[in-house]
Image (cartoon, helix red, strand yellow):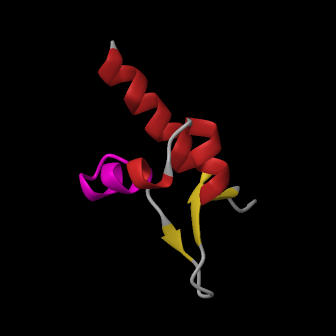
C-alpha cells in the first residue's frame, strides 16, 4: 500500500491561497486540515486530509 502524499505547509498555503496566520486561526477553531508533526519537528498535511477539507468547504458553501 502506498503512503499518502504529504504536503509541506507552504505548499498547502499556496494551494488554498491563505496566509500562515489565517491558516493557524482556522486551525485554532478546528476548521483547518489536520497537521501532522514529523519526528524532526516539521509539519505536513496529507493530500487526503486537504482534499477532504476542500470537499467540506464546498458543502458548506452550497
Q: Is residue 62 left or right of residue 8?
A: left
Q: Residue furthest left?
A: 29
The image shows residue 36, relative to residue 61, as above or below, that is below
Extreme residue toward the top, this view = 62
Q: In the rendered view, would you say 36 is above or below 18?
A: below
Q: Say whether residue 47 is visible.
A: no
Residue 54 vs residue 24: left or right?
Answer: right
The residue under the point 36% across, 21% down is: 59
The residue segment tinted magenta is 24-33
Residue 55: image location, x then y, percent: 46, 29
Residue beneath the point at 64% across and 42% down = 14
Q: Is residue 8 left or right of residue 22?
A: right
Q: Residue at x 27, y 58 (%)?
A: 28
Quarter of the image containing the N terminus? bottom right
Q: Position of residue 22 (x, y in %)?
A: 39, 48
* Nearer to the camera, 5 or 26: 26
Amino acid at each position: 500500500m502506498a503512503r499518502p502524499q504529504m504536503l509541506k505547509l507552504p505548499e498547502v498555503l499556496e494551494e488554498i491561497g491563505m496566509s500562515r496566520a489565517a491558516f493557524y486561526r482556522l486551525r485554532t477553531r478546528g476548521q483547518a486540515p489536520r497537521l501532522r508533526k514529523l519526528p524532526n519537528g516539521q509539519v505536513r498535511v496529507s493530500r487526503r486530509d486537504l482534499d477532504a477539507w476542500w470537499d467540506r468547504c464546498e458543502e458548506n458553501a452550497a
